[in-house]
Image (tube, rainbow, N blue to C red):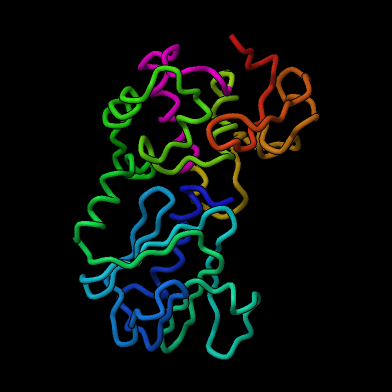
Amino acid sequence: MPEGDTIHKVAMALRPLLDGKTLSRGRLREYPEARFAGKTVSDIGVHGKHLFIEFDEREVLRCHLGMTGSWHRYAPGERWRRPSRQATVVLETDTDIVICFNASEVMVTRARGTRYKELRQRLGPDLLADPVDYDEILRRARLRSGQVPLLDLLLDQSIASGIGNVYKSELLFIHRLHPLTTLATVDDNKLTALYQDAADLLRRNLGDGRRTTRFPRDSAGRLWVYRRAGKPCLECDTPIEYRRNGRHRRSTYFCPHCQPED
């Protein structure tokens, strides 16, 4: 499942393929009128779960993978591993074909234009930025209703960018917080620590290998609770529970013993 660390790894993989390169062809499924042939990629950036590809310092392609999107690289003439109808973005140079399949959102806008600036301003600080602006995250969080449950708060990309469903469940377990704990009951120090640990986990997962939240890793597994419904808690042996709660009814995993509801 793409989260902030996934998109930063995508950017790291795309830069040597596209950054500074001139496109021989390019097409977007949602923008058939867009013309990219002859344009040069001038920057590839990330903010949370959003990937930004800039062309000639004039236009920006924004891509959000959603739940099922993915980027692939092919050599010219190589057979694609997915059907062409799923190709949302296709960018070609003389040596590489870079394709995004099944992206949930794609937008083309002027670099530094109003739409671009408004989007960046709506997003909370990127948890993989250096440094992370925790004061701004705290300020944005405290503007929300005190009755907002933490499971919704952590997924709100307008507060902090990069946390997805996996890290949401894992962070709440690590901090022994029930998913329905309300914002008003969490003080500033605890809230800041929650986001600091989110940033730490995201950064530790920028390398190769599958996403991990248990360090050091052992035979018990990579994750504390995510997708472990019915299995014994790795701390107390209580069966992990699964629910669909919150504003978007996203899947949430937790230990009812280690994370008691107040």
Q: Which one is in front, 40 or 183?
A: 183
Residue 216 position in % (x across, y down): 62, 34
Residue 125 position in % (x across, y down): 32, 40
Residue 115 on the magenta span: no
Answer yes or no: is residue 224 visible: no
Q: Quadrant of residue 260?
A: top right
Residue 72, compared with residue 188, is above or below; it is below
Residue 204, compared with residue 116, is above or below; it is above
Q: Quadrant of residue 128?
A: top left
Dominant secondary-structure state across the stretch colored magenta: helix
Looking at the image, the residue that sits furthest to the top is 262
Answer yes or no: is residue 245 visible: yes
Q: Residue at x 67, y 39 (%)?
A: 222
Residue 82 position in % (x across, y down): 64, 74
Residue 251 position in % (x across, y down): 64, 36
Residue 194 on the magenta span: yes
Horizontal side of residue 175 vs 158, given as left or right: right
Horizontal side of residue 206 vs 131, given as left or right: right
Q: Which one is in front, 110 or 80?
A: 110
Instruction: Quadrant for the C terminus, please.
Output: top right
The segment highlighted magenta reads 179-203
Q: Which one is in front, 224 or 110?
A: 110
Number of numbered labels in the structure image: 0
Q: Residue at x 55, y 69 (%)?
A: 101
Q: Quadrant of residue 106?
A: bottom left
Q: Residue at x 36, y 51 (%)?
A: 47
Q: Residue at x 74, y 26 (%)?
A: 240
Residue 213, compared with residue 211, is above or below; it is above
